[in-house]
Image (cartoon, grey):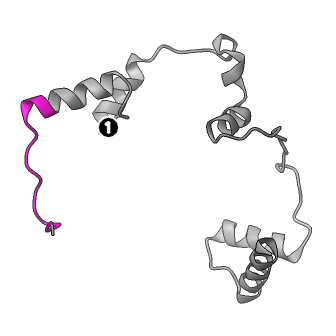
Amino acid sequence: MNDPHDHPEPLSRSEKELLRSLRLLGELAPEAADEVQSAENAWDDVTEEELPDSLRDPITLAASIAGQTQTVVQASFEDAEPTTFVELEMARVARLGNTISDEIERRMEQDRAQAAS
């Protein structure tokens, strides 16, 4: 078993070159702050008009990546007001970062059980 306090072996020259090549080809995402900054500086700005139609709608794009074949319906909840106790409670928890009450936990478990059956 590896000791978490052990330092990893330094990368060999060929390993460093392999990682560099994979990053340059876009196969690995940059990780360190300087790598991210370098990658961002290398990108050309693209306007929405320059994007192909298949990339313009992020919802449809995400659905296609996830393998969804059904029609994607977009809904906007920005102006929606919470109308039930559960919605108000969940909004409170999200706003304050508190724990969910026992009542809401119980209702969520009931909903899960009902959805599973």
Q: Which residue, given by chain and number where applicable, does mark 1 sit on?
A: 33
Is 57 above or below relative to 51?
A: below
> Residue at horizontal 72%, vertical 18%?
53
Is 21 above or below relative to 11?
A: above
Q: Quadrant of the C terminus?
A: bottom right
Amino acid of disc 1: Ala
Q: In front: 42, or 71?
A: 71
The answer to which image quadrant residue 5 occupies is bottom left
Where in the figure is residue 33, as x and y percent of width and height? 32, 37
Q: Residue furthest front?
A: 117
Where in the figure is residue 100, as x and y percent of width and height? 67, 80
The answer to which image quadrant residue 52 occupies is top right
> Residue at horizontal 8%, vertical 49%?
9
Q: In front: 32, or 65?
A: 65
- Label 1 sits on a secondary structure element that is helix
> Residue at horizontal 79%, vertical 82%?
110
Where in the figure is residue 26, as x and y percent of width and height? 38, 26
Where in the figure is residue 51, as x and y percent of width and height? 65, 15
Magenta-tinted stretch: 2-15
The main secondary structure of the magenta stretch is: loop
The answer to which image quadrant residue 59 occupies is top right
87 on left or right of 98: right
